[in-house]
């Protein structure tokens, strides 16, 4: 039985313990304790873990994460950050000569700080632990 009061984390704890049956009882307890510590250090004022969710509205991989976060909304608090997109910039001399459009793909600076590859979805907890696709 997992020793956590958060159902979303309890299922993850059970999965990890199930996958790590070769671990000693001490290692299994250490794994459960580390998960509980991660939860307690990332709690928001509501008592739920607080996450920052870097996403993109057009990304199918991020859609799966959005569905999971929404499904567990009562147990996790998150802030959505639209991290990828397009912006129009001033044309350079070369672009004026080629008559190309001046739209550029951008990635949010905080996304790049936490995930140098700039891939979404990326989730960051209150302790700055990063989860990527």
Image (cartoon, rainbow, N blue to C red):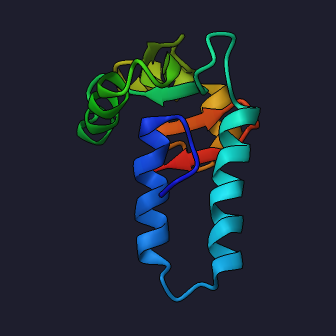
Going 50% across and 34% down the picture, which residue do you hit?
Answer: 6
Residue 13 x %, y %? 49, 56
Picture quadrant where residue 15 is located:
bottom left
Picture quadrant where residue 28 is located:
bottom right
View extreme (front): residue: 1
Q: Is residue 85 above or below residue 9?
A: above
Q: Is residue 33 left or right of residue 68?
A: right
Residue 8 x %, y %? 42, 39
Going 65% across and 38% down the picture, which residue do you hit?
Answer: 39
Q: Is residue 120 visible?
A: no
Residue 55 x %, y %? 42, 28
Residue 121 x %, y %? 43, 39
Picture quadrant where residue 100 is located:
top left
User: Front-most of 85 and 36?
Assistant: 36
Q: Is residue 87 visible?
A: yes
Q: Is residue 8 left or right of residue 124?
A: left
Going 31% across and 34% down the picture, which residue do you hit?
Answer: 68
User: Front-most of 41 and 80?
Assistant: 41
Q: Is residue 4 above or below residue 97?
A: below
Going 37% across and 28% down the picture, which residue do you hit?
Answer: 69
Total marks shown come to 0
Q: Is residue 24 left or right of residue 57?
A: right
Q: Is residue 95 above or below residue 123?
A: above
């Amino acid at each position: 039985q997992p020793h956590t009061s958060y159902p979303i984390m309890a299922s993850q704890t059970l999965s990890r313990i199930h996958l790590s049956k070769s671990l000693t009882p001490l290692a299994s307890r250490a794994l459960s304790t580390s998960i509980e510590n991660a939860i307690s250090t990332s709690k928001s004022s509501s008592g739920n873990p607080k996450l920052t969710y870097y996403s993109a509205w057009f990304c199918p991989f991020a859609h799966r994460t959005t569905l999971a976060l929404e499904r567990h909304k009562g147990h996790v608090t998150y802030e959505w950050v639209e991290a990828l997109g397009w912006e129009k910039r001033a044309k350079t001399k070369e672009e004026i000569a080629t008559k190309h459009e001046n739209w550029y793909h951008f990635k949010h600076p905080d996304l790049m700080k936490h995930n140098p590859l700039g891939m979404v979805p990326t989730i960051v907890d209150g302790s700055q632990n990063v989860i990527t696709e």
